[in-house]
Image (tube, helix red, strand yellow):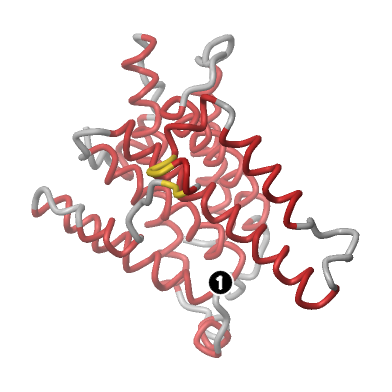
Amino acid sequence: MDTNNLSHLAKIISDLANSNLEQLQGKCQDEKDMQDYYLGILQKQALLLLDLSTILKNRQSKYISTPYIILRSLLDDFMHLMYLELSNNKEEEIIKINAEAYKHCFVSLQNLTDSNYEHFDGKYPFYLKQEEVEKVKNQFINKDKNKKYFKEITRFKFKSFMTFNTLVGRINHSREIKIYRDRAYYLWKEFSEFVHYSTFSFKMEQQDTPENMNKIDESFQYCYNSIYLSFKYFASEYDLNFIDNEALRKRYGIILP
């Protein structure tokens, strides 16, 4: 398996995502947390796999940082999708995922505001003042569609979602599922070392081994399954059939039918 073969595979999987996205044209007009979550992941798979196809084409096989960093993000999505598929309340879990994201956004905004007062006496023109932060928070609270994200709205306290490690531990419904979980988690952790740089990743790129290419190919299995799992929502909601690719199905298989 060389980088050009992997580039071709990434393009085929991206095309698969786009083929299924085309079935949704004219649909998904209203804003819904579940719908938009699965729609967003389908679009992300289509786009990042196309980017990955371009990156891998005619690339020296030892330069794996960029492919691994992209695949780390896609593996993260797969683990969340697998957890959600096995959950008894997908909608509430997705609301918590979104609430966690909003919480991080507002915490980061507050940190910058605190920095404005600590270092610039609140006068730095590109940071908000505290009263401006409070205005943004009030605007967010006053939208009915955002109320579901709060645990205690009067205290501006968001609902929380579990840590990634906790999520992984809860994907434990069968021996087969745990085997796939462990492999995906192993790859996620290894690819994470290329996000948080150390000499480990530097030395890995000095080793031009077939194993590095095999890890990319294995990760494509989880990308293929992410597309399948994401589209299950739309198949149920709109009575659609998943447009599959028989070659991909034979190569990678469906993990959660």
Left or right: 103 in relation to 75: right
Q: Position of residue 246 (x, y in %)?
A: 35, 30
Q: Left of 250 or right of it: where is 173?
A: left
Percent x, y for residue 11? 57, 41
Q: Amino acid at mark 1?
A: Val
Residue depicted at x 53% and y 23%: 21
- Please tell me whether residue 229 is drawn above or below residue 216 in the rendered image: above
Q: For the C terminus, which image quadrant?
A: top left
Q: Which residue is mark 1?
A: 195
Residue 116, placed above or below residue 222: below
Q: Nearer the viewer, residue 182 or 161?
A: 161
Q: Quadrant of residue 256?
A: top left
Q: Circle 1 — which element?
A: helix
Q: Which residue corresponds to the image point at 56% horizontal and 71% vertical from the top-left?
A: 195
Q: Position of residue 96 (x, y in %)?
A: 38, 43
Give the residue at the far left of this rendering: 175
Vertical position of residue 56 compared to residue 257: above or below: below
Badge 1 density bin: few <14, some 14–19, many ≥20, Cα 10 Å:
some
